[in-house]
Amino acid sequence: MYNFRTDYTEGAHPRILQVLIETNLEQEEGYGEDRFSMQAIDLIKEKIGQPDAAVHLLTGGTQTNLTAISAFLRPHEAAIAASTGHIFTHETGAIEATGHKVLAVNTGDGKLNPSLIKQVLDEHTDEHMVKPKLVYISNSTEIGTIYKKSELQDLSNFCRGQNLILYMDGARLGSALCSKENDLELSDLPGLVDAFYIGGTKNGALLGEALVICRDSLKEDFRFHIKQKGGLLAKGRVLGIQFLELFRDHLFFDLAAHANKMAELLKTELSQLGIQFLTESPSNQIFPILPNAAISELQKNYGFHVWEKVDQDHSAIRLVTSWATKEQAVKGFVEDFKKFNV
Amino acid sequence: MYNFRTDYTEGAHPRILQVLIETNLEQEEGYGEDRFSMQAIDLIKEKIGQPDAAVHLLTGGTQTNLTAISAFLRPHEAAIAASTGHIFTHETGAIEATGHKVLAVNTGDGKLNPSLIKQVLDEHTDEHMVKPKLVYISNSTEIGTIYKKSELQDLSNFCRGQNLILYMDGARLGSALCSKENDLELSDLPGLVDAFYIGGTKNGALLGEALVICRDSLKEDFRFHIKQKGGLLAKGRVLGIQFLELFRDHLFFDLAAHANKMAELLKTELSQLGIQFLTESPSNQIFPILPNAAISELQKNYGFHVWEKVDQDHSAIRLVTSWATKEQAVKGFVEDFKKFNV
Amino acid sequence: MYNFRTDYTEGAHPRILQVLIETNLEQEEGYGEDRFSMQAIDLIKEKIGQPDAAVHLLTGGTQTNLTAISAFLRPHEAAIAASTGHIFTHETGAIEATGHKVLAVNTGDGKLNPSLIKQVLDEHTDEHMVKPKLVYISNSTEIGTIYKKSELQDLSNFCRGQNLILYMDGARLGSALCSKENDLELSDLPGLVDAFYIGGTKNGALLGEALVICRDSLKEDFRFHIKQKGGLLAKGRVLGIQFLELFRDHLFFDLAAHANKMAELLKTELSQLGIQFLTESPSNQIFPILPNAAISELQKNYGFHVWEKVDQDHSAIRLVTSWATKEQAVKGFVEDFKKFNV
Amino acid sequence: MYNFRTDYTEGAHPRILQVLIETNLEQEEGYGEDRFSMQAIDLIKEKIGQPDAAVHLLTGGTQTNLTAISAFLRPHEAAIAASTGHIFTHETGAIEATGHKVLAVNTGDGKLNPSLIKQVLDEHTDEHMVKPKLVYISNSTEIGTIYKKSELQDLSNFCRGQNLILYMDGARLGSALCSKENDLELSDLPGLVDAFYIGGTKNGALLGEALVICRDSLKEDFRFHIKQKGGLLAKGRVLGIQFLELFRDHLFFDLAAHANKMAELLKTELSQLGIQFLTESPSNQIFPILPNAAISELQKNYGFHVWEKVDQDHSAIRLVTSWATKEQAVKGFVEDFKKFNV
């Protein structure tokens, strides 16, 4: 059984474990005030070219989203998200649990744009409705698509014009930035969004997300919010050490590039067999539409999500690759598929 | 500079890191449904002698407290805690952020008892006041004291009689259970409290607390709450692996015993020098009262909290030992103190 | 300028003001424990034929909805509502502000049914999503439609089978029950829903809604929730006196019948002029589709909401009648419309 | 049985009922946008000499406190209150239910001062604790005392220096301002506090409190918060009409002066009999310390709270007077007391 179910089926990249061991007995301050976290934060600021950014290391994606969004909004303000957005569908109402409505927008491709947001703004006219204030986007999105620089620039201009906060969930930012179709640099982000996070968990870390707050007015007292929401690890060094290793050189990007390469290989091979895809994904999640019979056979040897029914005889499945995906497994999957797809 | 500031200044016990490495490339389900977590949970149930308990692995103490307490209470219900209780003083209002008041009770020794709780109940007579519903205790307490079995039995009887939920914060449960003065077994707890957690972070893990829910009516849907509050790690294996190692044999208890031994050593040596202590602590936190001049000198070479002013010339400091504390450092501290304590 | 904008443009029915004056100097207990409130509650229990129901008098609809729903749900549980539902669209995220997601369902007619709810349940499969637990319906709905007894019976059976709480927002329950097409009795409701409220504000009271909790498990400690959410009036007599007068005889129903009669008159007259309606409303809100030019002219003399654009030249408007609507004004509106509708 | 239990045992002053009747059939906008509310708001701004203040009419004290405080604070910020403060003791955790801790301070007289607040600030040093941000005071206090102008000026200066929000609960502001010992004008308040409310319910209205927001940064979007918290009455005219009548001339002050006069009479008469008082109250709540035997007898004919036990044979009771208290009843109480106090 080989698992293409998620990008967090294995542990951490071995280099990360190695430094955990090497630094293990050094005595450090707690709660993220250790030297590793401080260095990792400085390194991230350097990589994004923003010495004034506020960078915080948190444990996971939902934790980061709920802490940031609840810290940024006043009680009557709401987030706008694609209806496929992680905060709308797969975080157990975590944002609502902090008191804020998430306004969902249907999109074909999981991406928001000024026109879609404008519709939401136009519908919210007075104090009997929530006040849309934050735009939540994911890059790559939950269905594998990515934002082009021009799309993000348009969104950014629109949000600034409307005094909206633009927040990017980067659980899979590595994969987005290393996509063949990507034209964004990590260092472009502070100029475009008000806050974003760099996902570690889905790109080779044991756990950890690095939240970057770019807009000054959102920075104040942020550590209070992390602590209050339960996200301040006593041994914050665990997060610091990992991000330090991921960004010390190109490891973060190398891992994402490998994941994308494996997804690309799957896509190319399946395409050559005439397979269609549910979404145009250039990142590490792909959604091939396969005959149900073949899916049943493949499930005997491979783990993956059956995403949605497409027609009577076909369904889209989700295949996710990661830094740890083996080329051999990808090839095996394709070979097996050929056998079952008669 | 040697640090006695906390019990989370070092990383994890080497055995834990070792198994993280050994298991690193095994593919596992996410979100705590991996085999390691399942095994760790089964092992904990076995150790506490409660096959029906619900056990969940969470990231940290505040996360565990806020998730459990908000899951257990209805909106108008409140927690009762000692005024030294961690949820009252050092969690940035995390419980209140979930909507619940914490009713603080002054105690001399950081411990609650039926009489103190009864006073709170007597004051809360109608719907203009919150309804006290959960009793929060820590063992060991924030000032190093521990609950004797008879004390806990009294509390337990009282809470059951009053239909109160009895919840034990076990961030330092290891140290409490391995204290010389302790007469409780881990397996006694399910018969005495409704829920408790076994602290990993402060006893040799990188991170992780194991919440044990004993009362049936509190178990339902608990994973929803963990996810909603941001505490469900994608790579839940990280927690499972650690608790599996801690409880595979006696490691959990060995580490706590070492910490206590080091604290005992400090206490004995300082007592012999005529030093008094702020609290009667038989666990890994001690609070010697030292001359301010000596404190200033010691701060040059040792990290510790100055806890409170005792008189014009003396203050209590907090010294915390851990699984990683070196006997040599303890002896060095005492020697240095002798030099400065003229 | 005559106003068809809402059913709360005038004050209270004169009989209500009269008893406010007559009872004004009687000394009463505060916070709803006065004799008038007690009598009103007993009277309502009698009218609904449910001596065991718990009845509470609250100030307004949003207050009632948020207090009840937050009291009934645990933190991870969500409400299901039509996308036109008041809690989803026009209460400024009040339910989310108490921590609960509202799952919206598109309907043609503003009404939920088992099939629509089942779709929501089917999509919510695990702890990464909220748990749908309460079904919120309005009768009459926000677009004037009403539930037939058989429809409500189906909903009720389904909800019981799925262990869902069925809650009815009765801001305009009077109008629904007095509709020509209605086949429900007030006394049917306790057998069909778990809780509902009888709207006073929109049916002749100055303010006030009577919440009826039928399911035993939802009754406990409810006054704590009212107080905590700010809904417990010091001079609760104001609410008691009004409901006592509304239900002392047939006043509540007479007022609603008048409102419906005025709406019916508008509908009949406009229909005879060939006007179509956006919804099939048999209650006190109707939505005629008028030429934009006529709308502009009518706005000079009449207040009403322009509800939505229908085509290039037509829009639906909302006309609301009430206990205080004058037949003369209705006839005047129709006459004026004829003038402008050339 | 005559009731001295509260100042809300009767209905409204007859003049208020009279205008409710006179204006009853005028058609008005809903949700506080009616002409009466607008005029009342303008009148209040004029009376306080602050054309730029934001004034909102709400239904009750708890509603006002929770709406204002939750609107003013960010999630990690806390309110400081006297331990006798209404929000700490008698609002069922309403502030905590919106997510904010209330930090209680013991005082002898129910009043806060810079020194007491400074202690709280000094104890809150970092992100592991909430951030004290709002100072909640009541005038008159819950134990009948009032703030002198100089005391309020000191508090105001201190709060501004510390960037704290100073908020005054004025449920009984009328009584405070009409006290013999008072040296504050209503128009002094905008210069001293950031927000306060003028209590109507306890001074002759059926219901209603007028919140005045003086600090610009606290004004934005406030109506969203009122609506979200359930406090926006559909027939807002009910509030507008009442405040318009209360402030049209001196009615508001006349009613409070009468209440004070009756309390003063009670105090003078009881003092002459050698009775001591629990607090030095110059307002409409007094706390005489009476023999338990006399209390038992008085309870047969008079309603009042037994406030606290003073010694074996004596308890303090609370007597509250209002605009409606009859001089004859006061005299009767004293006469009866003489009989029982042998």
Image: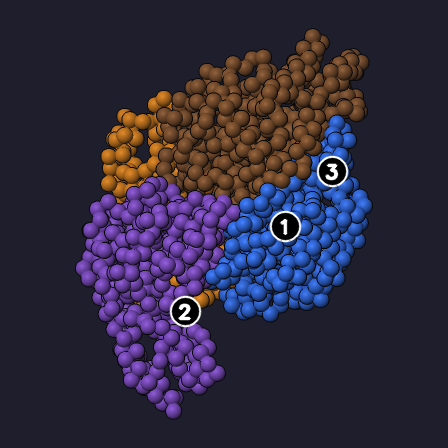
Chain colours: A purple, B orange, C blue, D brown
Determine the residue located farthest toward the left in the rendered image. Answer: A249
Mark 1 packing: few (<14 Cα in 10 Å), some, or many (20+)? some
- Residue D294 falls in which quadrant of the image? top right
Whole-angstrom CA distance, mark 3 to mark 1, is 25 Å
Look at label 3 and name its amino acid. Pro
**Label 1 near label 2: C-beta < 8 Å?**
no
Q: Which residue lies at the image location 69% right of the left edge and 8% below the top edge?
A: D272
Q: What secondary structure is found at the residue carrying circle 1? A: helix
Is C62 positioned to the left or the right of B306 in the image?
right
Q: Which residue lies at the image location 49% right of the left edge and 45% below the top edge?
A: A127
Q: Do marks 3 and 1 share a subunit?
A: yes
Look at label 2 and name its amino acid. Glu
Mark found first going from the N terminus, 3 or 1? 3
B113 vs D257: above or below: below
Q: Which residue lies at the image location 45% right of the left edge and 40% below the top edge?
A: D221
Disc 1: which residue: C333
Q: Nearer the viewer, mark 3 or mark 1?
A: 1
Q: Nearer the viewer, residue C152 or A205?
A: C152
Q: Position of residue B260 (x, y in %)?
A: 39, 46
C302 vs B40: above or below: above
Disc 2: which residue: B29
Q: Which residue lies at the image location 54% right of the left edge and 66% below the top edge?
A: C120
Disc 3: which residue: C14
Is A56 positioned to the left or the right of C16 in the image?
left
> Dividing the image into 4 quarters, which one contains the N terminus of chain A?
bottom left
Q: Position of residue C46 (x, y in %)?
A: 80, 49
Q: Nearer the viewer, mark 2 or mark 1?
A: 1
Whole-angstrom CA distance, mark 2 to mark 3, is 68 Å
Look at label 1 and name its amino acid. Phe
Work out whether residue B112 can be spotted.
no
Work out whether residue A330 can be spotted.
yes
